[in-house]
Image: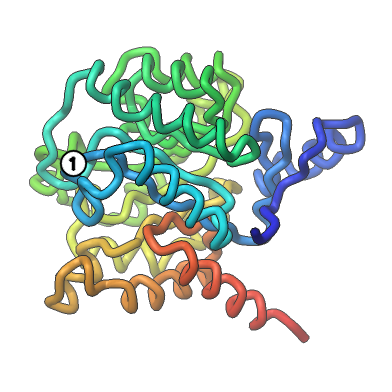
Amino acid sequence: MPAANFSENKITKMDNKILEKTSQTGAIINTNGRLLDLTHPVVMGILNVTPDSFFDGGYYRDLDSILKRAEKMLSEGATIIDIGGASSRPGAEDIALDEELHRVMPAIEAILKHFPHALLSIDTWRTPVAKAAVEAGACMVNDVSAGRYDAGFYETIAALGVPYILMHSAGRPRQMQQKAIYDDVVTEVLDFFIAEIAKLRILGIRDIMIDPGFGFGKTIQHNYQLLNNLPALINTTGLPLLAGISRKSMIFKALDIKPENALNGTTALNMVALRQGAAVLRVHDVKEAVEVIKLFEMLSVD
């Protein structure tokens, strides 16, 4: 299995010095006492334990298929596995809290039992789900809502002390595409990040990644404007950026194909995202994303 970009050791005094030096850029984040180095891009593999996600809904709903999927992603070089139990595709309706917990908790527990060193992210906007997942061993929270759907969510993240992925979206999934209206999408997304990061810092949340939210309340044109301007988001915030482009409508609608035929387009745009400074590629297809990163890093070899 390819080595992930983190240290197995608990944080030492030397590690703390490194963290102090990188606090301005967020290049190294603390995941349950292990340091994840984002100075070199990494892959986050998507594991949706849902019946209705736009690409892989219904594929991984029993523990056997979930474990096989996790094993495959880890063997192919995924550094993080992002587990989601509620679809956030455009038009998706909210599901009950108990249903989300029923979907994600057995998956987290089973994966960590079989792969105890796996880095798991929980994709949720709900406080009880975030708390239960982290208590079970998840080491970061990926939130499509930016704390807006559940009162006190930011305070929960601060209390949990885990890295937080802050994503921009325009409202809830069921109506976000009707809110894809901007005077200047890049400026407005950047202003959003600046304001939200300030709130997170006040609460003491140190390890933050930003996600421009490709496809979340944006037209195809908005998505490409953001992709072209990732350096502005990264340089202004000083934070690592996660690019979640995999098989999305900005690819399959632009090419007039179906999501299952959008791997080639995903690979092409993942390379663009890396050239624009992305630190994490969130993908359905781990092997291909790892290969893109290897080739990208060859470009910087003298």
Quadrant where the image shows the C terminus:
bottom right
Q: Residue at x 18, y 41 (%)?
A: 51
Residue 18: image location, x then y, percent: 83, 42
Foreground residue, 150 or 282? 282
Tell me the crowding category of disc 1: few under 14, some 14 to 19, or many 20 or more residues within 10 angstroms, Cα based: some
Q: Residue 295's image quarter?
A: bottom right
Query: Most extreme residue toward the front, as rendered?
Result: 64
Residue 129: image location, x then y, percent: 37, 20
Q: Is residue 145 left or right of residue 157?
A: left
Foreground residue, 267 or 118? 118
Query: Most extreme residue toward the right, as rendered?
Result: 14
Q: Residue at x 25, y 16 (%)?
A: 98
Q: Residue at x 41, y 51 (%)?
A: 69
Residue 148 to residue 44: above or below: above
- Looking at numbered disc 1 in the image, what kind of residue is underneath it? Pro
Q: Residue 270's image quarter?
A: bottom left
Q: Residue 301's image quarter?
A: bottom right
Q: Is residue 234 visible?
A: no
Q: Is residue 189 visible?
A: yes
Residue 151: image location, x then y, percent: 32, 14
Query: Most extreme residue toward the bottom, as rendered?
Result: 302
Q: Is residue 202 left or right of residue 286?
A: right
Quadrant where the image shows the N terminus:
bottom right
Residue 176 to residue 232: above or below: above
Foreground residue, 91 or 197? 91
- How many marks overall? 1
Q: Which residue is mark 1?
A: 51
Residue 237: image location, x then y, percent: 54, 46
Q: Is residue 113 left or right of residue 130?
A: right
SS type, badge 1: loop
Q: Residue at x 15, y 42 (%)?
A: 176
